[in-house]
Amino acid sequence: MATSNGTLFAASVELLKQLIATPSFSKEENDTAEIICAFFDKHGIPHARVGNNIYAKNKHYDITKKSILLNSHHDTVKPNKGYTLDPFTPIEKEGKLFGLGSNDAGGCLVSLIATFLHYYDRNDTAYNVVFAASAEEEISGVNGIELVLPYLGAIDCGIVGEPTKLEMAVAERGLMVIDCIAEGRAGHAARKEGESALYKAVDDINWIRNYQFEKVSSLLGESMLTVTVIETENKQHNVVPSQCKFVIDVRVNELYTFDEILDELKNNLKSKFKPRTTRMKSTSIDLKHPLVKAGIALGKGYYGSPTTSDKALMPFPTLKMGPGDSARSHTADEYIYLDEIKNGIETYIELLGKII
């Protein structure tokens, strides 16, 4: 199955064009899942599907060997109103390929598929190579990578394809969203009756605004609390609100657990609160891990990523890395440079070649 990089590049671009032309919003990835399955069929690679997730294992998969996972997602966000081009029409122009999902994370996805094809029938590797195209990444959905992981066998480490300019994201912030409720007592505003839940919420919000966590990561900086939503159930100007709700967006570095964050809030907030989920934990990979050392040998730099990905849901060391630029993700007239895809394929193949 090992073919020239030029052949892999041409096949990757053609596949990406098909994916761009096919809407695949989170939870609506059925059609792109079928396209990926058809691609594997065309290349004679056995594969399986769990929900809208597709996975495959190398031809000479051996349970006595360690396994490395190559993963990226095929769902997209919805196009924003700033688009001047048809988001579902792949357009090549000035060395770029335009289209929704081209950069996030189509370029990474097809580059990893090409890498999987390159190593598919090798029988002289120390690692198995497992591939998974996951769904619902953009919404951290439960029917995405978590659904397919049990079918992949034991995984020792992985590469998560996200646009990082082919630099190595060795750490990633965790994300926790917390719903808060301040409670008071209704009354007439003109008579200064009641007990304002809004004022109680504001007191807590002021504490959140000014609080700083002590432990600062060299990779991810400080953990952050940001209030992003506030509302009362009362819409009348002359009624003191008895309840006020607000939402905290929590970005956690690798030095804190979610439980530690929640304990700090418990000790300082008067409002009741409850996290929506604690699944998206902060993660990091040791700088001495073979994947990272291989990247450094290729001249790649490393950094801590402020964004979250399916990396947060994997219970094994992972390196987030891929062609494209995170700054282009979710923007109007999204694009990826064709050379970025070519370099992505070459870099992934060279990186794996140093460890497997």
Image (tube, rainbow, N blue to C red):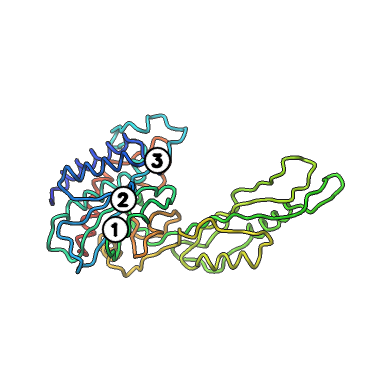
Query: Residue 353's mark?
Result: none
Q: Nearer the viewer, mark 3 or mark 1?
A: 1
Q: Is mark 3 on a helix, strand or loop?
A: loop
Amino acid found under the numbered disc labelled 1: Tyr
Front-lying residue, 323 or 56: 56
- Residue drawn at 38 percent across, 38 percent down: 334
Q: Earlier in the sequence, mark 3 or mark 2?
A: 3
Residue assigned mark 2: 50
- Secondary-structure class at tag 1: helix
Which quadrant is home to the C terminus?
bottom left
Give the mark nearest the N terminus, 1 or 2. 2
> Does residue 196 appear to the left or right of 296 in the view shown?
right
SS label for mark 2: strand
Vertical placement of residue 63 versus 31, above or below: below
Q: How crowded is mark 1: few (under 14 residues within 10 Å), some or many (20 or more)?
A: few
**Residue 25: which disc?**
3
| Of callouts 3 and 1, the N-terminal one | 3
Please, what is the three-letter code of the amino acid marked with disc 3?
A: Phe
